[in-house]
Amino acid sequence: MSFIIKTLIFESVFQANPIVMIQFIPLLTIQTFAAVISFIAGALVTLVVFFLIFTSSKEEDKTSAKHKVYKMRGRYFFGLVLSIVIVLLLTLRLLPYEKFQGTPEETVTVVAMQWMWKMGPGLSDKKPAEFGGAGEITLPANKMIRFVVTSSDVNHSFGIYNSKGVLVTQTQAMPQYNNILEHVFDEKGEYHILCLEYCGLPHGLMVGKININ
C-alpha cells in the first residue's frame, strides 16, 4: 500500500514537472531492477525450502524434513561467510585505493536542507543556515574533489549519480557535523545529487546537479 501511495505522489509531481521526471527515470529503473532481483532471490530460497519439505518421503516425519532444511541453511550460511571473508581479504589489503590517494585539488562546501542542496567552492566559515550556495556547480574532471558535507536541519544523505543512474559515491549529511567525501570524476557530463534518506514528503524532489567539464 505504501508503495502505491508513493507511486501516486511521484506521478503527480512528474506531471507537474517533466524535467524532474527525465532526471528520475534511470534512477527509478535501477531501483526497480534491484527490487526485482531481491524478490527473485527470496523466491528461489523459499521454493528450495518447500521443495525439500514436500519431496520428503511419506515415511519421513517432519523432524527429518526439518533437518534437511537446517542442513541446507547451514551450507548456505557457511558459503556466504566464506565468500565475504575472501572478498574482504582481497579488497581491504588494497586500502587506501590509489584513486583516492593524494591531496584534493578543489574543495566544495555542501549544505543539505529540506528540500534542496546548496553547494559552493571552497570551505565555508558560515553557519549552514547562512550559507548561500546554489543547487548546481561545475567541477573539473580527473581531479580529486573534496566535498565537505553538512546539514542545516535534519539528517540527509548526499548521493551522486551519473547519467546512467548509477550511484558513484555517497555520504551522510548531518546537522552540526561535517562529513568529508573525496572523489575523482573520471567522466565528463552531468551528475545528479539525490537525498537517500527520507526527510519529508517532498524528499523525492531534493535534486542537485554537478557539471563535470
Image (cartoon, grey):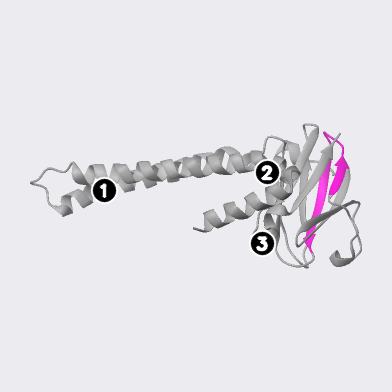
Quadrant in the rendering for residue 151:
bottom right
Q: Is residue 125 left or right of residue 67?
A: right
Q: Earlier in the sequence, mark 1 or mark 2?
A: 2
The residue that appears at 72% across and 42% down in the rendered structure is 23
Q: Quadrant of the C terminus?
A: top right
Real-space CA distance between mark 1 and mark 3, rounded to the nearest whole angstrom: 43 Å
First in sequence: mark 1 or mark 3? 1
Q: Which mark, by number, is residue 24? A: 2
Q: Mark 2, residues whose alpha carbon is within 10 Å: few (<14), some, or many (≥20)?
A: some
Is residue 174 left or right of 45 when viewed as pictured?
right
* Relative depth, front residue between 136 and 85: 136
Q: Magenta part of the protein: which range?
A: 136-151
Residue 167, placed above or below residue 113: above
Please name the residue that numbered disc 1 is placed on: 69
10 vs 93: above or below: below
Q: Amino acid at mark 1?
A: Val
How far is disc 3 from disc 2 in space, using C-alphas? Answer: 16 Å
The residue located at (86%, 45%) in the rendering is 137
What residue does disc 3 label? Answer: 201
Three-letter amino acid code of the residue under disc 2: Phe
* SS class, disc 2: helix
Element class at badge 3: helix
Residue 39, position as x, y percentages in the image: 44, 44
Which of the pair 71/186 is nearer the observer?
Answer: 186
N-terminal of the pair, mark 3 or mark 2, is: 2
Label 1 SS = helix
Q: How many marks?
A: 3
Nearer the observer, disc 1 or disc 3? 3
- Confirm or deny contact between disc 3 and disc 2 (CB under 8 A): no
